[in-house]
Amino acid sequence: MTGARQDGSSGILLVDKPEKLTSHDVVDAARELLDTRRIGHTGTLDPAATGLLVLCVARAVRLQSFLTGVDKSYEGEMRFGIATDTYDRDGVPVGPPHPDPSPSLDAVRAAAVAYTGEFLQTPPPFSAKKVAGKKLYELARRGESVATEPKRVRVQELTIRDVSGDRAQFGVTCSSGTYVRSLVHDIGRDLGLGAHLVALRRTAVGPFRIADAATLPALEDLPVGERTRPPHWIPLSSVPLPFPVVPIAPGELAKVRHGHAIPVRLPADASGAAWVRLFSADELVALGQVEPLGRGVLALARPKIVLVD
């Protein structure tokens, strides 16, 4: 094959995950399609959920920590009248169904207001969150009750788009680590109806959009050389990181490659930045930090994450 393992392609692969597959299944499939073992993701999706998975390929794996904590957007559907132990459609109903689970649009929107902004959220009992080294779903399946600490989350926007009978369509943009299942469960509880998540589709991860993603069958149908082409593929040097660019002289590349600090001319937008992107010509060679040298534009750039081999 002539994929990523041989030609050294490094970048971001945007995949539209189908239902039933786990995020790990998608990673395994991408490894085969791109002929590389070095792939990581920036946040999982439950098997029942669909939508955007952002995969870091080859040297882009070194950028994972900068891409996992970004906001994420979803479109979903909730069903009123039945709460489940997993807070979604795969769970076991908890208690009898409500006899009249048909709230008004205004009522659901009013309940959703409490779940915008910053607040403490309790994870669902069936989740991958760990307590004492054990995943919550493992403990829940054993029948063990575990008190979980609420986590502060931020919901930038929660829009109830439509309510029809016992179903509501919604959109949400939230911080990484927010459980949409818990949002749905809590809204249903507050309405006195019970509710669970029926469908969920991730539409955005930070600057990445589902419109640019490719399905696994579509990738498989492409010639090998076109699997690392835009828009579903973003080359390493084009990954939209929120750090200013600092150019380095061609003669300094070898030093950066070995992690050595080098002098640079500091652009105005890089002054005071926590991180910078060090570029040699059009190639991203490292992420680093800079220390001004005196009061002029000269600075010392220290490579922290080298992106060239």
Image (tube, rainbow, N blue to C red):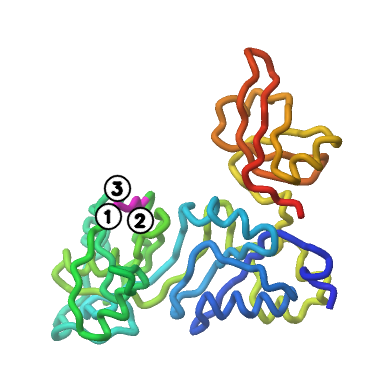
Residue 280: quadrant of the picture: top right
Which residue was labeled with disc 2? 158
**Residue 179 vertical placement versus 208 (above, below):** below
Q: Position of residue 52 (x, y in %)?
A: 55, 67
Residue identifier under label 3: 118
The N terminus lies in quadrant = bottom right
Q: Tell me the element at label 3.
A: strand
- Asked which secondary structure carries label 2, the reply is strand
Specify the amino acid type for callout 2.
Leu
Which of labels 3 and 1 is toward the front?
3
The reply to whether discs 3 and 1 touch (Cβ–Cβ < 8 Å) is no
**Residue drawn at (24%, 62%), measured in percent from left and top?**
122
Would residue 153 be counted in the magenta stretch? yes
Callout in the foreground (1, 2): 1
Near mark 1 (Cα within 10 A), the count class, few <14, some 14-19 or many ≥20, is many
Give the extent of the magenta segment. Answer: 151-155
Tell me which residue sits at (63%, 68%) in the image.
Answer: 39
Q: What residue appears at the point 17 percent right and 73 percent down from the top-left corner?
A: 193
